Image (cartoon, rainbow, N blue to C red):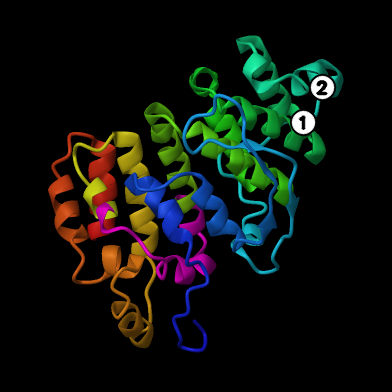
Amino acid sequence: MGDGSVTPRLGNMKALLGIVAGAGASYGIYKLISGGSFKRNKKSATNEGPGVRSSQPSQVTLKPGSLLAKVSGLDVVCARPVDTDGVDVASGDIIHQSPGNLEPQHLKMLLSCLKTSNNPSDRCRFLLTLGNAAAFTVNQNLIREYEGIYIIAGFLSDPAAEVRVHTLNALNNLCMNIPNQEQLKVQALKVLVNLSSNPDMVDDIVQAQAPASVVLLFDARTAPPVLLRLLTFAGNLKAWTPSAQVADELRRKQDCLFRVMLDESSQLHNRLVQLLSHPDREIQAQVARILT
């Protein structure tokens, strides 16, 4: 905003906020972090559910200056361990099987290989296979039970753009049932918290389009793990102080995150006051920190 203008550089941040509000899918995260610069081949898988895609290897063009480049080193979930010997040999047969023929032990092995691989090409193959397997409801449930959503989402911050694309393709298929959507919401909030903790990115974040329903999540009925991350995100944004000129420009953008959460007209303050009586003391402390 150095020139005083408020031209959104992260217009597709709304997709990530939509996930949190229950109005989007994981594929929107790619739009957020890439600026849309990628090419992907598509192929339908048999017995796929609505909105589920079977992926093929893709070619990615990393756009200089895009958020995809900025968050390359961002650790969303946890650090990945180093590669182990024999990963390709152990998983080669599984990768070439039809996704519908994979058994539970195969999914476990793929997730284990994904966690331990330090080869970008191998990670792409593991994610591609897991994503195609997630075209089937039974596999969506099994991957969640094996903590696969957390494992896969950890590669949203992979240094290789191709790996990040395959990660989002896999998450897109995994989010096709409600239990998985809940876990994905947590992962989306982790990304938002990490991004908002970087002062250089807050200028962009507050310009993003945001569903008004985001504020409704600041409620005692929201699951405590989700609410705590929401409060951390809100606290990070509250610590940002715009100039008077920038604030005036943002107020003219009715659907931007600034108006939804930070402006004097926002309903967030009233909802935070109500949360001061929340039974969870950690939540009470987070709310008090934001209000003071």
Q: Position of residue 102 (x, y in %)?
A: 66, 15
**Disc 1: CA contacts within 10 A as few (<14), some (14-19) or many (>=20):** many
Q: Position of residue 223 (x, y in %)?
A: 28, 34
Disc 2, SS:
helix
Q: Using residue 115 as the reference point, say whether residue 204 is left or right of it.
A: left
- On whether residue 110 falls in the magenta region, the answer is no
Identify which residue is drawn at 39% across, 69% down: 240
Tag 1: amino acid: Ser
Identify which residue is drawn at 55% across, 19% down: 146
Image quarter of residue 125: top right
In terms of sequence position, does the residue under pointer 2 or pointer 1 come before the other?
2
Q: Position of residue 256 (x, y in %)?
A: 34, 68
Residue 99 seen: yes
Identify which residue is drawn at 52% across, 85% down: 2
Which secondary structure type mostly characterizes the magenta part of the structure? helix
Image quarter of residue 245: bottom left
Task: Give the CA separation, mark 2 to mark 1.
Answer: 7 Å
Q: Using residue 192 as the reference point, say whether residue 106 is left or right of it.
A: right
Image quarter of residue 34: bottom right
**Disc 2: CA contacts within 10 A as few (<14), some (14-19) or many (>=20):** some
Q: Which mark is residue 87?
A: 2
Tag 2: amino acid: Val
Residue 119 seen: no
Disc 1, SS:
loop
Where does the magenta region start and end?
193-213
Q: Which mark is residue 117?
A: 1
Callout 2 touching callout 1 (CB < 8 Å): yes
